[in-house]
């Protein structure tokens, strides 16, 4: 009886590609990353962390946050890395294509696409309009889809993704894609969609040696959480800061709200060579709110 042919990944010679384990994460020399929504918050922390890891980084944001984007970019240059700013609305595919081209021209061939940009809104179902829903999905879902597509096309066209050095694509999901939170239905469903896209594209991109993963933060002290806190407070009759205090006391096992750098540490790992065998995952980084 003849054995069935092995699937593609088993037919290659992974042992030849094995590297010895090291105590620290493998750091690449001059790899190039795009981080969307990186003028502030989690995106900024990711961009600075990747620069510290050795990456050149293209900073993206919308026109309203261009000044912040320029500052982050200068900070990265002061660390001896290349950086550029590509102002683009991720919900518009042609702008995302343009962003990728700017990045390739200014800092070099793409290795890592990080679709971090997103928005949140607190609204009960009974008040939710189609416009609210559409805006949420345009930025949080189409935005990720646009980055995955333009990123994948660029990575494939460069012909430089191998099993030893896969291309990496990552996106921001959230714990709301694991656990229901009242008043965040459209935000929550947009992040479920990010999980879904991530799994489907991980399957499709494997043959191109590109891994696709998402990170799911919990409660991170950024402008976005300030907005959620304020809106939740209004709806629940709580003062500013009270909902976050309640959540950290009752919901977060580690007992503290997270800082953007907590998320950046996970992204640093997911972008590194040490995560090469991980794909299709949405990794939670929440101090123990949801335990998957
Ligand atoms: P933030 O609001 O502080 O920063 C988001 C950045 O994205 C801003 O600079 C904003 O201008 C930019 N942005 C918004 N729309 C854009 C668009 N259309 N094109 C390009 N840029 C755009 O938010 P954050 O807390 O840093 O969140 C970053 C990501 O992490 C988001 O996807 C968010 O949903 C996710 N997240 C945040 C939390 C949290 O508690 N803060 C929790 C879970 C997930």
Image (cartoon, rainbow, N blue to C red):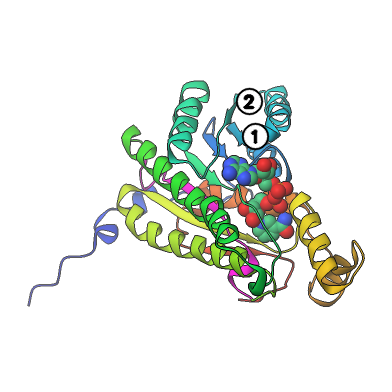
The disc label shown at residue 190, or none:
none
Position in image of residue 14 (x %, y %): 34, 54
Which residue, given by chain and number where applicable, does mark 2 sit on?
81
| Span highlighted in magenta in the image | 161-179
Where residue 50 sits, quadrant-wise, is top right
Task: Give neighbour class at mark 2: few <14, some 14-19, many 20+ (Cα, 10 Å).
Answer: some
Q: Residue at x 27, y 54 (%)?
A: 12
Position in image of residue 142 (x %, y %): 47, 51
**Please, is residue 285 above or below residue 161 in the view?**
below
Name which of mark 2 and mark 1 comes first in the sequence: 1
Q: Residue at x 32, y 35 (%)?
A: 157
Position in image of residue 226 (x %, y %): 81, 55
Give the camera-side residue of 61 and 267: 61
Where residue 215 sits, quadrant-wise, is bottom right
Question: Element type at marker 1?
Answer: helix
Contact between marks 2 and 1 (CB within 8 A): the answer is yes
């Amino acid at each position: 009886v003849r054995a069935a042919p092995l699937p593609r990944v088993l037919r290659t010679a992974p042992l030849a590609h094995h590297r010895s384990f090291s105590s620290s994460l493998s750091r690449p020399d001059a790899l190039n990353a795009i981080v969307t929504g990186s003028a502030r918050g989690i995106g900024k922390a990711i961009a600075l962390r990747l620069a510290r890891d050795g990456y050149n980084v293209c900073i993206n944001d919308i026109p309203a946050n261009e000044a912040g984007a320029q500052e982050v970019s200068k900070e990265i240059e002061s660390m001896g890395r290349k950086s550029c700013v590509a102002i683009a609305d991720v919900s518009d595919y042609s702008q995302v294509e343009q962003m990728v081209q700017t990045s390739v021209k200014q800092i070099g061939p793409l290795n890592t696409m990080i679709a971090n940009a997103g928005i949140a809104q607190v609204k009960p179902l009974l008040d939710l309009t189609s416009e609210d829903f559409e805006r949420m999905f345009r930025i949080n879902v189409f935005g990720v889809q646009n980055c995955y597509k333009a990123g994948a096309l660029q990575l494939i066209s460069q012909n430089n993704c191998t099993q030893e050095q896969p291309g990496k694509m990552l996106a921001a999901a959230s714990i709301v894609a694991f656990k229901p939170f009242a008043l965040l239905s459209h935000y929550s469903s947009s992040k479920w969609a990010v999980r879904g896209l991530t799994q489907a594209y991980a399957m499709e991109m494997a043959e191109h040696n590109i891994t696709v993963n998402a990170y799911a933060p919990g409660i991170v002290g950024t402008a976005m959480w300030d907005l959620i806190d304020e809106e939740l407070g209004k709806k629940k009759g709580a003062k500013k800061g009270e909902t976050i205090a309640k959540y950290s006391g009752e919901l977060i096992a580690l007992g503290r709200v997270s800082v953007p750098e907590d998320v950046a540490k996970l992204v640093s790992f997911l972008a590194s060579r040490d995560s090469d065998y991980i794909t299709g995952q949405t990794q939670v980084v929440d101090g123990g709110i949801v335990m998957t």
